[in-house]
Amino acid sequence: MKEIKLRKYNQGLNQLLYSTRLEGENELQFNFSPFDEGSSWIANGSLSKIMMYTGVNDQNGKKIYEGDIVQIIHDQKPVIKQTVRFNHGKFIPVCDYRSTELRIVGNVFSLKNDGEP
């Protein structure tokens, strides 16, 4: 089964928040940490953006999420940078390359990607 992880960009805090998955008897919830007090991504959708983990780690072992900017490496040389997005049931460009050919170099929010628990 695919590991489901979410990341939320909170515009008010200018911060990336990473989810923990909580399973109840009749529901599935995702909590984000560090906890962003009083900010609901449903109620304040314009202030937050939810992004999904692609299921792939880059060549350095970092989890690749939607919204990450990845450097595509060919013959050990950087070739092109692309933003990861979900399109027609797959994550572009992650689906077209091996993890050893991908390196996270940033994200669309220009924040460091090292805050993940």
Image (cartoon, rainbow, N blue to C red):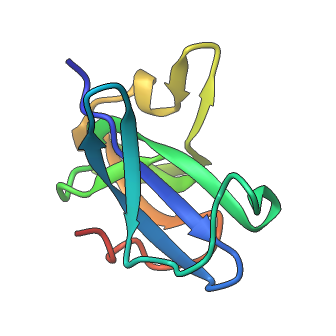
For the C terminus, the quadrant is bottom left
Estimate the x, y position of residue 27 in percent, counting from the top left.
Answer: 38, 31
**Viewer-side residue, 19 vs 42:** 42
For the N terminus, the quadrant is top left
User: In the displayed structure, would residue 39 be above or below residue 4?
Assistant: below
Q: How many marks?
A: 0
Taking the spot 22% from the left edge, 42% from the top edge, the residue there is 100
Question: Relative to residue 111, is residue 54 drawn left or right?
Answer: left
**Viewer-side residue, 42 vs 63:** 42
**Would residue 107 be seen by someone viewing this image from the given angle?**
yes
User: In the displayed structure, would residue 91 be above or below residue 23?
Assistant: above
Q: Residue furthest right?
A: 46
User: In the displayed structure, would residue 27 be above or below residue 76?
Assistant: above
Taking the spot 40% from the left edge, 71% from the top edge, the residue there is 113
Estimate the x, y position of residue 75 in percent, counting from the top left.
Answer: 29, 42
Question: Relative to residue 100, is residue 37 drawn left or right?
Answer: right
Taking the spot 54% from the left edge, 79% from the top edge, the residue there is 15
Question: Relative to residue 106, is residue 88 drawn left or right?
Answer: right
Q: Residue furthest front?
A: 25
Estimate the x, y position of residue 5 in percent, counting from the top left.
Answer: 34, 44
